[in-house]
Amino acid sequence: MLKSTIKAIEWKNDQLVLLDQRILPKSESYIICDDLSTVISSIKTMVVRGAPAIGIVAAYGVVISARSRRLNEMNVAQMEAYKCAVLGDLKQLALSRPTAVNLMWAVERMRQCFLDAYKEDFLIEILLNKAQEIHTQDIENNHYMAELASALMAKSTNKPFSVLTHCNAGSLATGGYGTALGAIRTAWKKNLIDCVYADETRPWLQGARLTAWELAQDDIPVCLNSDGAAGWLLANKNIKWIIVGADRVAANGDVANKIGTYNLAILAKYHGVKMMVVAPSSTVDMALSSGADIDIEMRTTQELTQISGLQIAPEGIDAINPVFDVTPADLIDAIVTEKGLIENPTTELMMKVFN
Ligand code: MRU
């Protein structure tokens, strides 16, 4: 867990306070969001990132929108205008990043709550309760998924083994504890794991900066590796599981996650290593029949051509920066959600759990 003094997302003194993940681990600095544009820019610029965390922040963002647009006394026409203005804000919020469906999931829950209660005197308290419920539930889900995931790992061997993870799917990326890192934390406590290999995760370096930082705080043995070293590691180290989070899971079990996850799944198949995805049901999008329909975010090519503002590639070079990829379901051994464990996912198995 993060030190108890560090909270990646906190509602404090009626404000949303976010740990700025862009500058970790160098410094622990916080951004206060008391207007919607700061919430939206914090999601877009990755002050906060990670699918469940983005959803939770968006939920608090709805509270901020509804509060800032409210007038003390409203006649019928003003009430309707208020409703339209907040619903417009919610549309903007839902567009702040495209791939993690937790964002749209949370905005939709908050939208329903707002529509049910926008005429109530206690609207803001009602919305805040809902956002806090989404936040708390996410942490509870993480712990439950970690139990399911570690029980599955325990079945595969009785000797300690290593795991490899990609990106950051830990406390920082969720309400707290983590999806993939939650599973790893619990498996470590059960003495199943001897070492966690953390892909650095180019270009944004979530693995080097965030996963390594989180695991080191827990005294879990963590070894950082370049993304390109994954094949060598699977061939030469005692890695039994690759464990990752997800940004969106389609109805057939295809998984969108941080760019490079698909490469890992292919490597895992070749080396007989198992591939596990840990994600709450808020990451599952049963409206999409396959991963081909998932909107993959393309980010600025400066993330590739520069490091900390320093140009490393030739000026003006052509570059492409898709930040997620889709791993086909048949390369995945298990999807772990709080609603249950799906081994060798197919549409039929997904429907049993999610319909
Ligand atoms: O671009 P990011 O850092 O928001 O991407 C995050 C990931 O891809 C994570 O692996 C995923 O959201 C799971 S987080 C529990």
Image (spheres, rainbow, N blue to C red):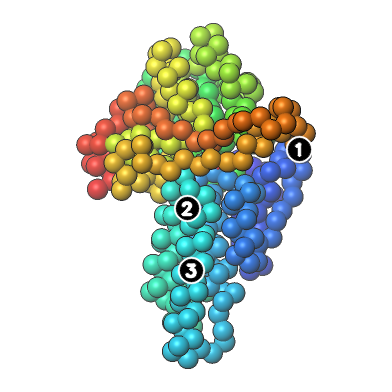
Label 3 or label 2, whichever lies nearer to me, is 3
Provide the secondary structure element on which disc 3 rests.
helix
How far apart marks 3 and 2 lie (CA) works out to 16 Å
> In the image, residue 137 lies at what x, y percent?
45, 53
Q: Is residue 153 left or right of residue 221?
A: left
> In the image, residue 319 lies at what x, y percent?
60, 31
Query: What residue do we see at 67% from left, 37% from top?
Result: 302
Q: In this view, does 154 lie to the left or right of 166?
A: left
Identify the disc placed on residue 64: none
Few, some or many residues within 10 Å of mark 1 (<14, 14–19, 20+): few
On the image, which quarter does residue 309 sit in? top right
Q: As shown in the figure, which amino acid type bears the numbered disc 3? A: Gly
> In the image, residue 281 lies at what x, y percent?
38, 46
Identify the disc placed on residue 309: 1
> Along the line of sight, which residue is nearer the eye, 56 or 240?
56
How far apart marks 3 and 1 lie (CA) works out to 35 Å
Q: Do the residues labelled 3 and 2 touch (CB within 8 Å)?
A: no
> Along the line of sight, which residue is nearer the eye, 152 or 34?
34
On the image, which quarter does residue 156 sit in? top left
Could you tell which of marks 2 and 1 lies nearer the N-terminus?
A: 2
Q: Which residue, given by chain and number where applicable, does mark 2 sit on?
A: 103
Q: Are marks 2 and 1 in contact (CB under 8 Å)?
A: no
Label 2 or label 1, whichever lies nearer to me, is 1
> In the image, residue 280 lies at what x, y percent?
41, 44
Residue situated furthest top in the rendering: 236
Q: As shown in the figure, which amino acid type bears the numbered disc 1? A: Gly
Number of dots carrying numbers: 3
